[in-house]
Image: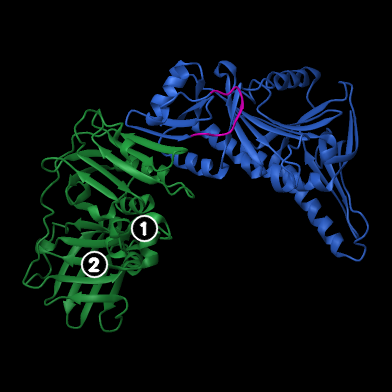
Chain colours: A green, B blue
Amino acid sequence: MSSATEDAGGDEAPDLRCQLDCVQGMVDALSSVRWKRHQDAVLELSEHGIVLIVEETGCLQAKVYLKRELFLVYEYAAEGRPRLGLSLGLFVDSLNTFSVPGHNSIIEILYPGPDMQLLLKSVGSLDACFYAEIRTRIPDTISGDYNFQHAGNTPVSFTVKSAVLKEAIDDLEWPGSSIQILLQPDPPSVTFRGEGHGDLQIEFFYYANIDLLIAFQCDRRISYRYKYKFLHATTSNITTSVLKENRGSKVSIGRGGMLKIQHLVSVARSGMQHAYSDAGGLHQPSRIAYIEFFVKPEEDESPINDS
Amino acid sequence: MKFKAFLTQDGVHLLDKRFLPALDKVGRICHVYLTPDHAMFLHNFLGGAAGGGGVECVAQFDKDLLFRDYRIASANADRIAFAVDVPLLHRALRSALTIHAQSLAGPSAAAAVDIQIKLVKKLPAGSRSSAPFLTFETKGARSAVVQDVPISKPLSRADVAELQASLDAAQDLPQTLVQVPDLSQLQSLVDRLKNVGDLLTVSITQYGDLHLQVSTTLITVGSEFRKLRVLGAHAEPPVGDQNLSARTRTEMAIQRGEALSVQVSMKHLAKSLQCHLAKPDCAFYGIAPHGACLTVIFQFFIPGTRLTDKSISFYCRLPVLDPGSS
């Protein structure tokens, strides 16, 4: 691996040099927050890993957390937390070229290149090599008002199978426009209600559907409305691997009705027989990328009940 | 002008399962060019309105591979060419095959069932002037089916001469050809690169490197395959070049005159890759002298051997785009 950094300009160590053996997992995770074709994203690098942030003006924010444990090598040498802006679509599309089937190469990510590019290249195979240089720009400021805080003493949240959540939200497309989410402790249940072209109500009862609703935490009745198109973005591009594994997705409602939806995406190489699978004691639980969506409630109405 | 022949078993199989699906992907309309020795399917070989700028594709078969009792006669040195709709041709062949299969299942299975094709002129229903057709006649055990595939008017003497001339011009081989290891892998790579940009730079070195690169103002994505088998002009890579990046290495090889590089349309390359539906045994890429075009040559082995089957010749020529015009 001594020749791995030959492309880096200058003698100084780059801010970040990391290697990953599961490109597909990273593609899956990043694709989950790609709700439209042209999207600008911000990458934030730190000693803990890489966070990718995408925003839709004022209402929706998504974050993908790629912890350093996901990487085979993670060398971080920057001061502070460098941030760079790039096109999410191009980033995903170029990562995608690395995950050609039957070609399980390891990918190296390097930042910055001689012209502040994000550099990707495959390592390990001498006879075939893939590379990409993505131009970065100075990122827009990330709005801080997605700061999620629990409203009361007990967090209000529920965990539901990812496939079920997606199905429910897909079904709500028909009434459209505005969706009310209602949690109440007695009987413990979650209700999605859409009123628009027609009415549709989807209810999950905690005791009735214990394998659907995996966890439920709510000590008071709480209800907010969210724009359907933002709610839809939180599940519309979830990759099939998430739906197949069907872990839970956690939905929480915080102060001011801020909705937080978390998904888990597996970043494990399929078929772990590869020699690298044991490197650095990487075991399954640490090979998860976390995805968080934050949706602000509709503002025009005061909360229906937030006692 | 006369043409009449029986399709051989191998011929039917080659066309139905391999070549017609591939040719269909290259382009819906192709020219069939029959000579006393060969049968050819040509795409984009007549310049002007029909041809101009597409992927030139040639599938040439020895007449004995596809046909028996091959009879051809024309005033133009016994050569006939016409345009045909590939999916229609395929449909006719398929249904002829179905009749064939039914009769094989029947009591008189031993009787050989033949598919005869011939060129005819007929009066189509509801029309006053006769039109040319390629007719498939299939005689099954209990039924006989005749299918007429409409074709264009046979090409004029001048057009056939032009077709032959551009075929002859396509004969000059690239100096260096590299063997592509895995066509389906390359196809899936190109499918992914398609999302990044429309123009692809292809470089081929005499060391056996194939380098593909897409570059836009925002991004450069590339892929290099090394140590491929080389046919033709071959050179030893300079010492120490494995420590350089793919791009530097390619640039240096071009400066030394040991590599050529051209820009082609991603769409054209994707199309040429569809030719792997014909299940070639290997494929070679090369750049014609002076960067005239990117040539892809598919090779077929005689079944059960590693010897090249000389009775099939299948290749594509991709037009080179002027880098200035993009």
Q: CA distance from mark 1 to mark 2?
A: 29 Å
Chain of the residue on which disc 2 is drawn? A
Residue A153, percent across and down?
6, 72
* Magenta stretch holds residue B230: yes
Residue B288, percent across and down?
59, 21
> Which residue position holds label 2?
A250
Task: Identify which residue, A130 or B95, lies in the foreground.
Answer: A130
Residue A275, percent across and down?
40, 55
> Would you place residue B67 above or below residue B287 in this image?
below
> Would you place residue A137 above or below residue A75 in this image?
above
> Which residue position holds label 1?
A277
Q: How many marks?
A: 2
Q: Can you tell which quarter of the image residue B18 is in?
A: top right
Chain of the residue on which disc 1 is drawn? A
Q: Image quadrant for the N terminus of chain B?
A: top right
Q: Point out the stretch of residues depicted in magenta.
A: B226-235
Amino acid of disc 2: Lys
Magenta span main SS: loop
Amino acid of disc 1: Ser
In the rendered image, is residue B122 in sight? no
SS of the residue under disc 2: strand
Residue A176 relative to residue B123: left or right: left
Residue B72, percent across and down?
89, 31
Who's the residue at 10% across and 42% down the image?
A: A80
Question: Furthest-front residue in view?
Answer: B239
Task: Bin the neighbour count of mark 1 within 10 Å (Cα to Cα): few under 14, some 14-19, many 20 and up.
Answer: some
Task: Identify which residue, B176 or A216, lies in the foreground.
Answer: B176
Q: Can you tell which quarter of the image residue A38 is in?
A: top left
In the rendered image, is residue B200 in sight? yes
